[in-house]
Amino acid sequence: MAVNIKINGMPLSVPEGSTILEAARSCGIDIPTLCYLKDINEIGACRMCVVEVKGARSLVAACVYPVNEGMEVFTNTPKVLESRKKTLELLLSIHERKCLSCVRSGKCELQSLSHDLGVENEMKYDGVRNHYKLDTSAPHMVRDNNKCILCRRCVGACRNQYVGVIGTRNRGFNTSIGCAFEEDLNTSACISCGQCIVSCPTGALYEKDQTQEVFNAIADPEKVVIVQTAPSIRATLGECFDNPVGTNVTGKMVSALRRLGFDKVFDTDFSADLTIMEEAHEFIERVKNGGKLPLITSCSPGWIKFCEIYHPELLENLSSCKSPQQMFGAIIKTWYAEKNGIDPKNIFSVSIMPCTAKKFEVGRDDQSAAGNGIPDVDISLTTRELARMINKAGINFNLLPDEDFDNPLGESSGAGVIFGATGGVMEAALRTAVETLTNKPLENVDFDVVRGTAPIKEATLNVNGTDIKVAVASGAAAANVLLERVKGGEQFHFIEIMGCPGGCVNGGGQPTQPASVRNFTDLKALRAKALYNDDAANKIRKSHENPMIKKLYEEYLEKPGSHRAHEILHTSYVDRSKDFEK
């Protein structure tokens, strides 16, 4: 049902239940916000979005104020603009304004609003500020409360992930965001997902930058520096260089990495295919031999940490496969090193990942296929860190030619690339598992039933007369709902879980987008579409048909699930729940 209103004198018909913010957007008017994030933080607290409504006693918050029949709204009157400017000036009065050195400079929503609203350099309300020590305790991120504006987006994002380990502390002028009892983040049950970082409008939260370590390695003549790029990076990196959301920039990404000085530029899609070979074999073995079901995927380190803390009784259900990042590093420092006569100690393995939890994962135990304490992966960088490296090196990304990955570990299937979207691991695994179980080629490799951005997706597939029930969950909150059903006795055979809502395309290490974009654009769907298009255009769409995967097994791993494969490609998990028992 439609509602008839006027915005700035212009007649408008909008759906019943719309907020003023949504109604204004539908007619091309962006009302500024700082605290509002759709479905995550709808609290109307910052007052940046105030508007005038005819007949109302005071200005109202457009982000939470519903429209009604005959309403007249004014979004840009002198009273409205002055109120927004004054609110912004008051926020800036307690904000550490070191913009030139801030990681979010140029991408900061507070900075953009200051420019748009004409805030002067000389602060009208400058005064006493609290001074906070940086929280650098976690392996993946830094909290700088000196730049926090108390918008509470990070609190909403953490709560939306079920975890809820941060919140407001103290009251009045001493209010701050952090963990309970003034504890550091590393003592909390944080899963390192980074959703708080991509939600933050300022530089108060950011990943631990390791780009200088990578520059140093590249400059070291003793090091062979090898880089791998996760499937989703090709669909998101372009946003850092003002490309439209969902632009596939694979060729330019490879070109940029070569110009940064990496010795070899490989594709994590290769090890995604390898993961499917091992995981599909593991699934088939469990189904045939009465193993622990459901088998649950292990690609997402945020999800793995969540399981270890919140659902340790399900650790036996986890696939023992390392993630594609770690599998790739393991193959680089074993097979590739042997094949090329390189001492694995001299290989510096770098990954470009959509995920801040990958920074935690590289330091996990049981991630040293080469032995002697040599890590499978030395450094994991986020998409944002790679963009900063490209800018620092003076590389004009949008003018680069398209180039191909190096071989042999740059060759992959379409099944590998869709790992970046929720449901992609499940679909890739089904392409291989179903063909193996039926012993005949699939007529259609697209499993549309597990596609889409819904938090939980379920399907029952009949394979050789046996019903196989599968489920997909993305985001820790959705995972928790699904796992409670499993613990309640509901039967599934195979479950894919990704720690971030929408999967890797929406990971905590992906490019930040302002609220004006996030609230009205389905970033997850647009980014995922680029991956599915890539898959559809690939001549090889099944992991087991990747010729380099076949060669790897023939030359080195023997077969999926072999003793050597287990030594190199599989891992173990720990019960972390006891670390947080009260």
Image (cartoon, rainbow, N blue to C red):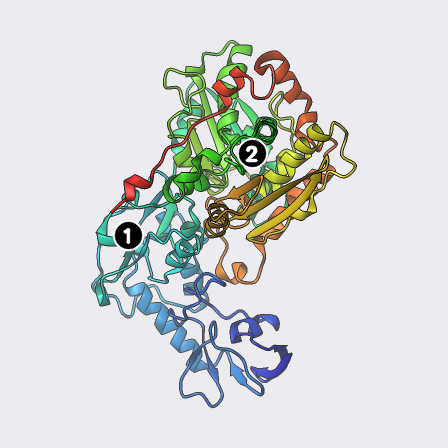
| Residue 550, numbered circle | none
Amino acid type assigned to the residue bearing label 2 in the image: Ala
As helix, strand or loop, the secondary structure at mark 2 comes to helix
Position of 462 with respect to 527 (left or right) is right
**Relative vertical location of residue 39 with respect to residue 166 in this rendering, above or below:** below
For mark 1, does the 10 Å Cα neighbourhood hold few (<14), some (14 to 19), or many (20 or more) residues?
many
Q: Position of residue 360 (x, y in %)?
A: 39, 36
The mark closer to the camera, 2 or 1, is: 1
Q: As drawn, which residue projects farthest toward the bottom?
A: 55
Q: What's the residue at 56%, 48% (across, down)?
A: 239
Q: Which residue is mark 1?
A: 179
Amino acid type assigned to the residue bearing label 1 in the image: Cys
Q: Position of residue 381 (x, y in %)?
A: 45, 36
Please tell me which residue lies in front, 451 or 530: 451
Position of 80 with respect to 528 (left or right) is left
As helix, strand or loop, the secondary structure at mark 1 comes to loop
- Identify the mark nearer the N-term, 2 or 1: 1
Q: What's the residue at 44%, 41% (across, down)?
A: 302
Q: Position of residue 137 (x, y in %)?
A: 28, 41
Pointers 2 and 1 in contact (C-beta within 8 Å)? no
Name the image quarter holding the N terminus: bottom right
Name the image quarter holding residue 554: top right
